[in-house]
Amino acid sequence: MEESLHQHDATDDAQPRLCRLLTSPRQRQVLQELMSGHSEKEVASALGISKHTVHHHTKAIYVEFGVASRAELLGRLLAILAESLDRERPAPAGGAG
């Protein structure tokens, strides 16, 4: 069974927070598809744009996040997500001491 490129579930709630860092709606779409594990060719087909255009958006995303590869991008996004989750975590009930 092949997963749809546009299938989303509850774990996607973090994606909009991360994607707000990008100014272009198309960059957000490309980022979401790339981080879902799809190749540039698959993203191009799904979004109805050329592979060259996807590559252009990918490079712009790398510049925005200050990375040089998809692996670095994933690490940066995970760090941003961890920071976001830490800020949203409620303070422990009852103080120590």
Image: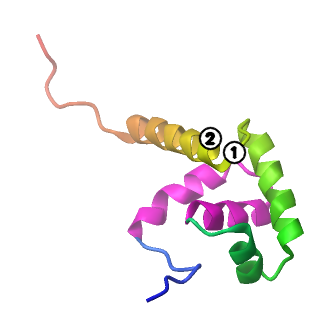
Q: Is 8 in front, or is 3?
A: 3
Picture residue at 66% right of the left edge, 52% below the top = 20
Residue 88: horizontal and vertical position, in percent? 39, 41
Secondary structure, mark 2, is: helix
Picture residue at 47% right of the left edge, 40% below the top = 84
Label disc, if present, on residue 28 of the rendered structure: none
Mark 2 — residue?
72
Span shown in magenta: 10-36
Which amino acid type is shown beneath numbered disc 1?
A: Ser
Q: Is residue 68 above or below residue 41?
A: above
Label disc, if present, on residue 69 of the rendered structure: 1
Q: Is residue 18 magenta?
A: yes
* Left or right of 36, for residue 39: right
Spatial separation of the CA atoms under disc 1 and disc 2: 5 Å
Crowdedness near tag 2: few (<14), some (14–19) or many (≥20) residues, C-alpha within 10 Å: some
Picture residue at 40% right of the left edge, 68% below the top = 10
Q: Are marks 1 and 2 in contact (CB under 8 Å)?
A: yes
Q: Provide the major secondary structure of the magenta segment.
A: helix
Residue 57: horizontal and vertical position, in percent? 82, 58
